[in-house]
Amino acid sequence: MQLRSYQMGRVRCQTNLRRLSMALLLYAQDHDYRFPPPDYRTPAGGYRTWVDLLRMYIDRQRILECPWNPVGDGKHKQKGFTFRCSYALNARFWGHFLPGPFPIENVEMPGGTVLLVEAGLRRTGSPFEPAAPPWITHTYWDTGADPLAYPSPHNRRMNIVALDGHIQTIFVAHYGPANHDAEYGHLGGGVFNWNGGFPNGDTSGAPRE
């Protein structure tokens, strides 16, 4: 029964990721093939996230939480985020390699580049932060950057969606810095943090681990 419950939760998250990735691609089609910013300030001084900008492309009430890693009352309220989401957008698509959005057509290996990962409620109880309150992560950098934020909720597995739209359930390859390139490195299942493990325009060598 527990295994079936995990399988149902995994499928539910895959459905959520599919909806979000389709909404992101529709947004990009309307915005010169650029994705929305991860978060931004409103004229009133509040914060919004990339999910808020997808209102025209998806029924926001149907973006459900990951059943094994649900979001809680935390960072989204502190920063004034209006939407809670158990999924995180790859931060490299905005303001990292160049100011503003990265043109998605410039990614040479979209099938090997992660777009969205499961995230959400940051697990508490760390020996380093025993009383830390839960908070929500809405952007993805690297699993090794904060293992508590990307805990592979499905029995040591994590659902991800790549830039080309395909969804995988992977075993996370790295939760630590040893022999791992946090910029381009392997996330798991043949999917990497950026461009299939290669810098743009330099695909002649081995992918970064």
Image (tube, rainbow, N blue to C red):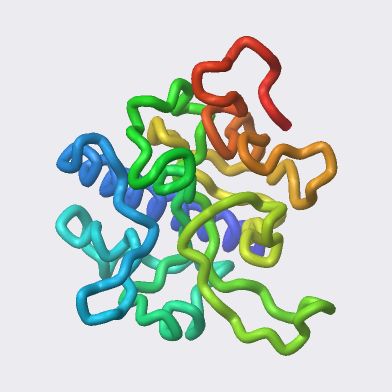
- Farthest-out residue, top: 204
Instruction: Pinpoint residue 120: horizontal percent, then vertical percent.
Output: 52, 67
Q: Which quadrant is the N terminus positioned in?
A: bottom right
Residue at 70% of width from left, 60% of height from top?
A: 147
Task: Please tell me how many numbered marks the rendered image carries.
Answer: 0
Q: Is residue 6 above or below residue 21?
A: below
Q: Nearer the viewer, residue 8 or 35?
A: 35
Residue at 43% of width from left, 78% of height from top?
A: 76
Residue at 79% of width from left, 51% of height from top?
A: 176
Q: Is residue 28 left or right of residue 80?
A: left
Instruction: Pinpoint residue 177: horizontal percent, then vertical percent.
Output: 79, 47
Q: Nearer the viewer, residue 107 or 12?
A: 107
Q: Which quadrant is the C terminus positioned in?
A: top right
Q: Is residue 137 left or right of residue 29?
A: right
Residue at 75% of width from left, 51% of height from top?
A: 175
Instruction: Pinpoint residue 40: horizontal percent, then vertical percent.
Output: 33, 65
Q: Is residue 181 above or below residue 158?
A: above
Instruction: Pinpoint residue 128: horizontal percent, then vertical percent.
Output: 81, 78
Q: Is residue 81 left or right of residue 148?
A: left
- Farthest-out residue, front: 99
